Image (cartoon, rainbow, N blue to C red):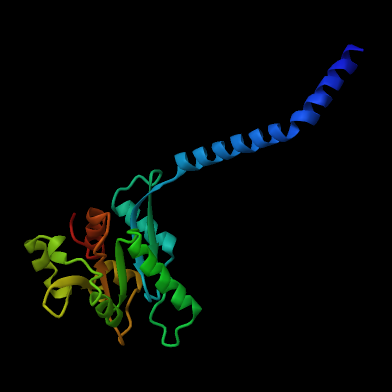
Amino acid sequence: MYKDKIKNQLYYFWSFYKWIIIAVGIAVALVVYFLAARLTEKETALSVMLMDCHTEVSDEQMNQDFASAAGLDQKKYAVSIQNSLMISEEEGGNYTMTCLARFLSDIGSEKLDVCGMLEQDFEKYDNADTWMELSDCFTEEELEVLSDQLYLDAEGIPIGLYADTLPVMAEYGCYDSEDSRGVIGIIYNTQRKDMAVSYLKYLADMEQ
């Protein structure tokens, strides 16, 4: 009798409160999920896009190489170097438009730090003041060392580095076409200027 009484009580309790119990259970599960995601989320140390670079080296390998060279704690920080994006396809297409939209969106949301692209495209986006002046990033002595590698705008201001002069880019086989040179620059509104400069120095094999 006692067991039957308990069963009846549990049955009535479940019948009246099951949706509340289910809702509370879902809410608790969601809170635990978002807390766990927050605690394990890595802070982005650097975001880079290498447009039309045509390399066989994976994004992951480039991320790992720079993170190791920069001495980053990879349990806390993440590097994002995307090298499969394209904006200079002659025939255009959906993928090209998607890549362009991603590029513009990441600049607008201040997520992007460094970008490389073919020289004609780099010049086009200079007209929109996309690139940071390298004189704001490097000392006069450093710019002198890089003098043969600098890309200058129409006013003679250094705003990028030619990719084919950078040892790391050469190792990756990026922008090695004889038809058009690649240029890499720092985005004007980067929120991680120091790390962006470190990345360019890394590419140029400069002591940091």
Pick out the residue farthest to the front: 16
* Left-right relation of 42 to 151: right
Residue 110 seen in this snapshot: yes
Pick out the residue farthest to the right: 1
* Point 32% across, 77% down: residue: 175
- Work out whether residue 109 or residue 201 is closer to the camera in this orientation and state it: 109
Q: Position of residue 39 (x, y in %)?
A: 45, 39
The C terminus is located in which quarter?
Answer: bottom left
* Point 26% across, 58% down: residue: 196
Q: Position of residue 24 (x, y in %)?
A: 64, 33
- Work out whether residue 114 or residue 130 is closer to the camera in this orientation and state it: 130
Q: Position of residue 195 (x, y in %)?
A: 26, 54
| Position above or below: 185 against 29 | below
- Work out whether residue 151 or residue 59 is closer to the camera in this orientation and state it: 151
* Point 20% across, 66% down: residue: 132
The N terminus is located in which quarter?
Answer: top right
| Position above or below: 88 against 40 | below
| Position above or below: 59 against 165 | above
